[in-house]
Amino acid sequence: MAGQILRLEQAQSLLLDRVKKIEETEVIPLWDAAGRVLAEDIFAGHDQPPFPRSPLDGYAVRSEDIAKASKECPVRLTVIDEVNAGYVSRRCVTSGTAVRIMTGAPIPKGADCVVGQEDTDYGEAVAEFYEAIGAYENYCYAGEDYKAGTKLLSKDMALGSVEAGILASLGLKQVKVYRRPRVAVLTTGDEILLPGETLLEGKIYDSNLYTLVTRLTTLGMNVVRTGRLGDDAKDVAAWIEETKKQADIIVTTGGVSVGKKDIMHDVVNRLGCERIFWRVAVKPGMPTLCAQYQGGLLICLSGNPFGAAVNFELLVRPLLGKMSQKKELMLKRSQAVSENTFPKKSTVDRYVRAYYEDGKVRIPNGSNASGILSSMCGCNCLIELPAGTPRLSEGDRVWVILL
Ligand code: AMP
Ligand code: MG
C-alpha cells in the first residue's frame, strides 16, 4: 500500500488533469446570479436610456431661444406643459415656449437642452431664464449608456452586482449560466456524532462536515449530498456508490491513515476505483487518498480538522476553480513579513494558519496541530514553509496562500 509520497505540485497536477471546465448550462433567476459564470454573450436589446432624458430638474427649451439670456436681461418663455420621470409630454417645444421637466423625464420634441431651475425664476405659466446654454447641454442622449446591439457581457464572465444590474437594465429576469460543480461530502468515524445528538463517552461532534460544507457553499458550489457514517467500509462504499451519479467530486474525511480502522483504502478497492495517489508531502493532512470513479473524483482527506481544511484548500479548491472557471478559486500566493516566530522545523512542506494584512502575517496564539480547529478562527491565510525551512523568526519573509 505504501507507494510513493507525492509532492504537492505533482498531486495537484494529477488531479487537475482529470477535471474539465463544466460546459452544461442552466437558466436561473437573476436574483441567484451572484458568483455564477455567464454561459452566453449578452447584447443590448434596446438603447439605454431608451429615450433622450433630462439629467436635472428644470425647463426643456430651444437653445436658440435663450441664446441672449442673462441675469440683467432675462428671456421670458411660456410654460406649455410639465413632465415628470415616468411620463411623456405630447407637446412640442416651439419658439417662445418651454416645458417644465424633472430629472429622468423624456425631453419633449423640439427642445434641444434643459435649463436647470436654479437659472430661472421657477415660473409656472411663464418662466424667466437667466443664462444661455448651448444645444444638447444638460441633454442625455438615447443610448448614452449603451446602444441597441452592443455586446455588453461576454460568455465566461463571472457575474457580480454590476453585471446583475446590467442584465436587469436590459429587462432580463433570468440568465443562462454554467451549472456549478456538484460536490458531496461524507464524514466517517465511529466516534463522530452530529450536532444535536447527545455527546456520549468517547465520542466527538463532527466539525469537518460543517467546515467543508460551509466552505463549499461560500465558494459557490452545489453541495448535492452530505452524510456521516461509522468506520464500516461496506457502508461507506455503498454511500459513495449511491452518490457517484450525482456528484462531480466526493470529499470524505477520516480513515486514510494506517490504523486498523483506516477503512478508506478498503473502500477504494471495494468500489473498484482507480487509485490516483495516497499521501502528499505536506503537513498537516499528509495521508490524503485520491481515486477516480466513473464521472468524478473521490478525495479522501484526513479526519483531523486542520488537516482536512488545509488539504481541501490545496487540492480541492483548484479543481473547483478549473471546473467552474472561477479564477479566484485558484490558489493565490502573496509575500509577507512574519510578525511571529514558529519553532518547528519542517521536513515536508508545512502550512501554518495565520492572519494576513498589508504585507504582514501574524500567527495566532494556540496550537497549529492538525487536530486543532479553534485557533483557525479569524485566520485568512496559510503560511507556506517549504521542506527544510529552519524555525521561522520574526521579520522573516514568507509566502502565504490567501484563503
Ligand atoms: P482519522 O483521519 O479518522 O484517523 O481521524 C483523525 C482525527 O480526527 C481523530 O482524532 C478523529 O477523531 C478526528 N476526526 C475525524 N473525523 C472528524 C470529524 N468529522 N470532525 C472532527 N474530528 C474528526
Ligand atoms: Mg478514524
Image (cartoon, rainbow, N blue to C red):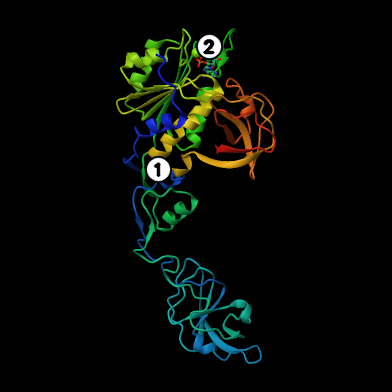
Mark 2 beta carbon near ligand 1 (under 8 Å): yes
Q: What residue type is labelled 1?
A: Gln
Residue 315, percent from left and from top: 45, 30
- From the top left corner, tell me how far across and down residue 258 is, in percent: 47, 12
Closest to the observer, 185 or 274: 274
**Residue type highlighted by circle 2:** Glu
Which label sits on residue 123?
none
Point out the image quarter for the C terminus.
Answer: top right
The answer as to whether callout 1 falls within 8 Å of ligand 1 is no
- Residue 244 is situated, as x and y percent measured from the top left of the image, at 33, 24
User: Tag 2, which secondary structure?
Assistant: loop
Question: Which badge, 2 or 1, is on the more N-terminal residue?
Answer: 2
Q: Which mark is residue 325?
A: 1
> In which image quadrant can residue 225 be found?
top left
Q: Between residues 375 and 228, which one lies in front from this camera angle?
A: 375
Q: Give left or right: position of 237 versus 403.
A: left
User: Is 175 on the left or on the right of 135, as rendered?
Assistant: left
Secondary element type, mark 1:
loop
Residue 207 visible in the current orientation: no
- The residue under label 2 is 191
Report whether residue 299 is seen.
yes
The residue positioned 42% from the left and 29% from the top of the image is 11
Q: Which residue is drawn at 55% across and 31% down?
A: 386
